Image (spheres, helix red, strand yellow):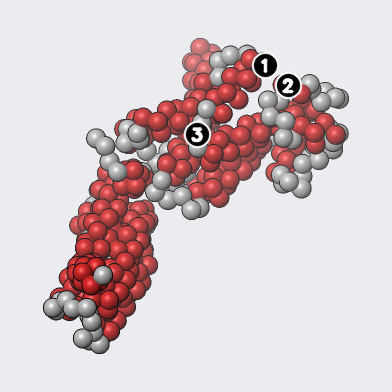
Amino acid sequence: MSDFILILGWFGLYAPMALGAIGSIMGCSIAGQAAIGAMLDTESGYGRYVGVSAMPSSQVIYGIVVMFTLNRTITLENAPGIFSIGLLCGLALLFSAVYQGQCCASAIHASKAKPEIFGLSVAPAAIVEGFAVFAFIFALVISGNIP
Amino acid sequence: MNYPTNCKYTLLVSSLPIHKTLLFDEKQTPLSRIQLNKRLKLLDKNDAADLLKIEQLLHWSHIKEDINQTFVNKTMGSIESLSNNFIKNIIIWRLEIRIILAALRMRHQGQNTPPVKNIFGFDYWYFMMTKYWHEPDLGLGKQLSWVAEANKLLTENKNLQLEKFLFGVVWDHYQQLSLGHYFNFEAVIIYVLRWDIIDRWNSYDNEIAAQRFNDLIDAELQNKIIC
């Protein structure tokens, strides 16, 4: 049983990084495909489409920071806490990246027809980013209580 | 090239120019059919087949047979073979519009009794239409608000306005259906169907323009002969 708890601890340690990376892969892929599609239909603004499509990459960075913050010698005392924080933070980062990718795709699609709304159209993606930041910051805060 | 499904539709939908909100603001199709077909090559085999089937079912230009029971059965078979219920419902809705309009036209031409059932193909509204054959809206006004207006235009022989009105009804219906479908196959289907409406509406204008052009040439030639 103790081995299993230790395994969960290691799982939780790497989860924010791995799940954040998976989310970023999916989010950037969705937004990136929208950017490529928009390039087929427009004559300019390619740079900003690609720039917006990279927005979901921040989640993997948050995941790396959380992983390093949680990084310590895994013991029976701290493994459950590391598992819980790591897994839940990782899931939050994963879903935020995927849905941010969808927001970015919509922003790219809408702004190619109306370039003047570009700034505003990115706002929903920024709001989603805000929730990812909440998950990230409070994972850092609460990890301070883990022995 | 095999793309993951989600990404493929994101790419495809993003590569298509956005339609304007109002149909009659569109003075031409946002991209040519050649360009549209090039983009639609991103569809996988089954989706492309479904799209072709929809266009064959809805476009008058694809209907070369007499409209009889065999044709109706064939059409129903084609609809049943579609796996996507969203698409099925779109086709049925469009065909129902045509059936109701056909009934209005029959009545307008002086037919006093409703036609036999099997000519309709779909019997969803058949009971109402037969029961209320002599009502202006065929008893469908509460469910389908456009019927009364269509009947009014038909009885006033305003054919162009009627056509325009019906295009508007279909356009608005597609607009409504498009909500919630942004980067998926349904969004592509709606896009293509709306493209078809713009194309048809503008083709009508082209026909009028060509006719006007021919009339002017004839008038000019006659003037020269007289001179």
Marks 3 and 1, how far apart at CA = 24 Å
Give the x, y percent position of residue A134: 32, 78
Q: Residues within 10 Å of mark 2 (few under 14, many from 20)?
A: few
Residue A135 vertical placement versus B154 (above, below): below
- Residue B180 visible? The answer is yes
Residue at 82% from the left image edge and 23% from the top image edge: B111
How many C-alpha atoms fall within 10 Å of the one at disc 1: few (<14), some, or many (≥20)?
A: few
Residue under label 1:
B69
Looking at the rendered structure, the kind of residue marked 2 is Asn
Q: Residue A114's x, y, as percent?
A: 37, 57
Q: Which mark is residue B118?
A: 2
Give the chain letter at badge 1: B
Q: Are marks 1 and 2 in contact (CB under 8 Å)?
A: yes
The Cα atoms of the two marked residues, 1 and 2, are separated by: 7 Å
Work out whether A144 lies above or below A86: below
Instruction: Answer left or right for A30 relative to B199.
Output: left
Q: Which residue is mark 3?
A: B83
Residue B162, labelled with which disc? none
